[in-house]
Image (cartoon, grey):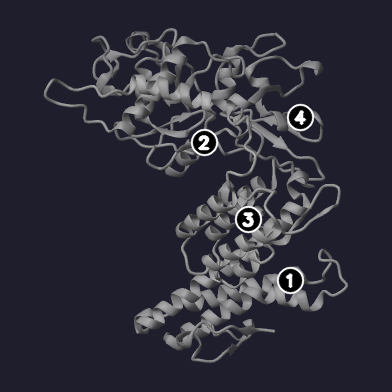
Amino acid sequence: MFEARAMGPAATGGSAAVATPHVLPRAVVPGPRAASDAAAGVRVVASTARAEESAGSAGTSRHSVAGVADRASAQFAAIRDALGVLRGLDLCRLSEPEVLDLARAAEQVVRSMYGVQVRLAGEISERGIAATLSVRSAAHLLRETLTITIGDARARIAAAAAGLGSETPSGSVIEPSLPLLLEAVDAGTVSKEHCAVIIGCYDRIPDQIDDETRELCRDVLLDEAAHRDPNALRHVAEHIENIVIPDRLPPDTDPGPRAELHIGARRRDGLTPIRGLLSPLTAEQLRVAVEALSAPTPIDEHTPDPRPAALRREQALGEILHRHLTAGAGPRDGGVRPQVVVTIRHDELFPASRRRGPAGPGGNWDGAGARPAGGIDRDALSDKGSGGGPCGCAIAWGSRDGSRLGTAPGRGSAWSDYGGVQPLSLARTLACDAAIIPQVLGTDSVVLDQGRAVRLFTAEQRRAITTRDRGCAFPGCDIPPAWTDAHHITWWSKGGTTDVANGVLLCRRHHTVMHQGGWRIDTDPAGGRPWFIPPAHIDPGRQPRRNNHFRILELTNRRRR
């Protein structure tokens, strides 16, 4: 049952190795043989739990196999032991072929382990555990539990559905579309990146294509994945799509439903990827608008415009958006005219080198000037263009809790509603034309505001709540402010007041959850931030939970203290 497949002469000594996880050496003399033994041990224990369940679960429900958790824990412990041996090897003693063989063995182990991760993700999805825990989806639950990206979580669930099948809410069984996929993963010939390419290509094949052609496409993809990297396999997938999605299929006369636009996550270099498919009319309008503003602009009669065409088009798009927001003709987000809002400390927005105060005693702004009462320099604000927000931007600033990311001039971070942590340069650039909104922020970014006895939150109150919560405040949720409602913590119907202290941002889903009962919201008396108390059927201890998704700056500040 614990047979290890040979990985090549150097890895196994030319014959199949037999091992059990209980005899893996904890201390060995590093060398080629130790490398092969440890690698074989990892391959063995990675598949042991599946082999044991297959051998001993005849006639037994897959959810009621006694001791599965204990056996799985033992196997994972054995894997960790084997990995410890591998990490301690003296790789310098290996020959070049042996190093390559061991690298291949390690890659196969990682790929095989992905099969275990996929099965676990599929089980979590099929059981509906996310709904039980009031999490948006199984993918979001995996992201929170495993600290993986939402894309990785969705890919695992998709691979489980493709390789294992699934069940509908009514109990109907959906057969796997790629039943051989996980076999290839288990064998170590297909990686998670290969899986994404294969599943994506197979899902794009139209339903009108006959089964024989679909099976041929599947076999070609799996065969080619064994000796092509994912990027090369993507070219194969594109070629297959060009062949099996021919022009003979009746075209959709209305391309609108197929149009899409995706705004990706901001990369580490600050740039944000955009991809999509535009309808003919939208594409034509975009071309006309962009081309009109992206023509080369020579520096002088002897110096041409140094910007490449792609950069000119990007800057033209930015100018179009700037003009749209300036006009204020767009729709409203949560009752507020669309604004680019960045939250930043006052002293970071206005560095000392650019502050000037009148001469006098007690000066602490660039030398001699006395600081105005409350620390707000109205002159500085007017110099920075406070007013109607001509570019549809707003800078909310104030004193948070005395902590900051760094003390060196020009260092620090700001926070934007959609982009999250942003460099100070972005806030200062926006401040050139933005409406400067002074907000005095207390501990944990609490906004000191005057409540009003009205049924609906005002735009100013909502802005203050947004500055504090920064998005849906429900634990684990990442919905941005524009897609949230301002919820009365103590319900309006039960005497709750409409003020900042009694307001919290919740997305539509979690707003509904709160009104269904069971969950309770308490506020931190020292900071005003909401705590969510789960019902007993979710957490018998009813331990308070808090959403820290939007609190990256504060978490970093605390760590630096």
Q: Residues within 10 Å of mark 2 (few under 14, many from 20)?
A: few
Lower sequence index among marks 3 and 1: 1
Give, as a three-letter code, the residue at label 1: Asp
Q: What amino acid is found at the position of numbered circle 4 in the picture? A: Thr
In the rendered structure, the answer to whether residue 547 lies left or right of residue 392 reads right
**Residue with the mark numbered 2:** 276
Pick whichever, 366 or 267, lies toward us. 267
Q: CA distance from mark 2 to mark 4?
A: 32 Å
Considering the numbered disc 2 on the image, is that residue within a helix, a strand or a loop?
strand
Q: Residue at x 14, y 26 (%)?
A: 303
Residue 156 vs 511, above or below: the answer is below
Residue annotated with mark 3: 156
Instruction: Identify the mark nearer the N-term, 3 or 2.
Output: 3
**Horizontal side of residue 134 vs 294, given as left or right:** right
From the viewer's side, name the closer residue of 232 and 85: 232
Q: Disc 2 marks which amino acid? A: Gly
Label 4, on which residue?
512
Q: Residues within 10 Å of mark 3 (few under 14, many from 20)?
A: many
Count up the numbered dots. 4
Q: Position of residue 49 (x, y in %)?
A: 70, 73
Residue at 60% over, 36% down: 478
* Residue ID for mark 1: 70
Q: Residue at x 60, y 31 (%)?
A: 255
Q: Nearer the viewer, mark 2 or mark 1?
A: 2
